[in-house]
Amino acid sequence: MTRVRDLSEEQILERIVPLLPKGSATLLGPGDDAAVLAAPDGRFVVSTDVLVEDRHFRTRWSTGYDVGRRAAAQNLADIAAMGARPTALVASLVVPGDTELDWVTGLARGLADGCAPAGAGAVGGDLSGGPCLVVSITVHGDLEGRAPVLRSGARPGDVVAHAGVRGWSAAGLALLEAGLVRAPLSPAPLEVSDGVLLEDAWERLVAAYLRPDPPLAAGVAAAEAGATAMLDLSDGLLRDAGRVARASGVRIDLDPEAFAADREALRSAARAVAAATGLGDPGWGPGKADIDGLIGAWIWAGGEDHGLLATFPAGTPLPAGWTAVGQVEDAGADPRDLDPPVTIGGKTPDTASGWDHFAP
């Protein structure tokens, strides 16, 4: 088994670079001191993010491919949330010497597959040794002549809409932490225990955690439809909606009946996690309240689905993939009226805390 310490940096790069996508905006890719990208709009959108081993991913769950997919997804979603089209990313990687080379090349393949839906390129980066795995991504995007969609544009009367899935990533992590699913995922049906096969729904939830699939095209569609505000849902619906509300000086009221399809997708996992973690009466198993409570926590506070939340003027036909989930309301003249900035059915949520990966 070849490990990183067995090869020079140049030899490792020789294995990685051919796996990376070029992208339609790339004029000069890896090989020189810097890449060259086309920027026909005259502006470009840029964002950066980092994933740290045992903070944002665990290697006993995540293959290099998984981490590459996740790194691409969370960065590309930030560009889409501005109403821009992702064009290129650069990746910096810190790798311990005993890391298997297959993990690193898997990361490159994951980046490539994550970039493919957007047609973005992976055009360079840096490679270094270190005590733990760290993946840092900087991503660029093209507004294509559109104005950027900011968090601060929501106005009273606007419709709040969502694109993507809700609570799936949090549920997938809960299944892993409860020991109900073994990972890395396999293309074959997974045996959970004693011949019991993993439910298809569970596998989709775990995949949503390991390999998020953000609705990248929905960002451009929202911008073209006249979205007044938008952001990537990385830290939980309540927390991120609160950021829009505070930036815009409004209150957001979310529909308690929203996300019905997601709730059904989560129910089997919630029942299993509640039972595995000892919720409910030990003699009877988890009760309905425990299951509904878990589903609610995943929906309202679960993070890292990387869906999009946007506001649209009343009466605007929502683009494909978008669903109305709430309303923007006047917060009043007093800034204290913004406490809380987000309500659910007109009521203060039990908690507005986000879901931040897992404890280090």
Image (spheres, helix red, strand yellow):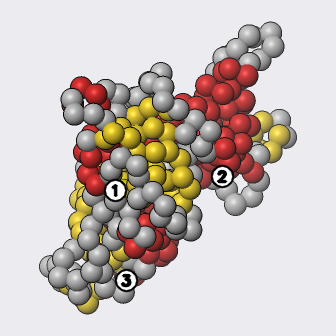
- Which amino acid type is shown beneath numbered disc 3? Gly
Residue 189 vs 223, above or below: the answer is above
Residue 23: give its label.
3
Q: Which three-letter amino acid code belongs to the residue tagged 2?
A: Arg
The residues tagged by marks 1 and 2 sit, at their Cα atoms, a distance apart of 30 Å
Could you tell which of marks 1 and 3 lies nearer the N-terminus? 3
**Vertical order, 18 against 250 (above or below):** below
Residue type at numbered disc 1: Ala
Q: Residue at x 28, y 28 (%)?
A: 337
Q: Which element type, helix, strand or loop, lies under badge 3?
A: loop
- According to the picture, the residue beneath numbered tag 2 turns out to be 204
- Between the residue at mark 2 and the residue at mark 3, the CA separation in whole angstroms equals 28 Å
Can residue 164 be seen here? The reply is no
Q: Which callout, 1 or 2, points at the residue further toward the start of the chain? A: 2
Whether residue 346 is visible, yes or no, is: yes
Viewer-side residue, 250 vs 198:
250
Q: Which mark is residue 229?
A: 1
Do the residues bearing badges 1 and 2 touch, measured as CB atoms within 8 Å? Answer: no
Residue at x 29%, y 75% (from the top left corner) = 146
User: In the rendered image, which quarter is residue 255 located in?
Assistant: top right
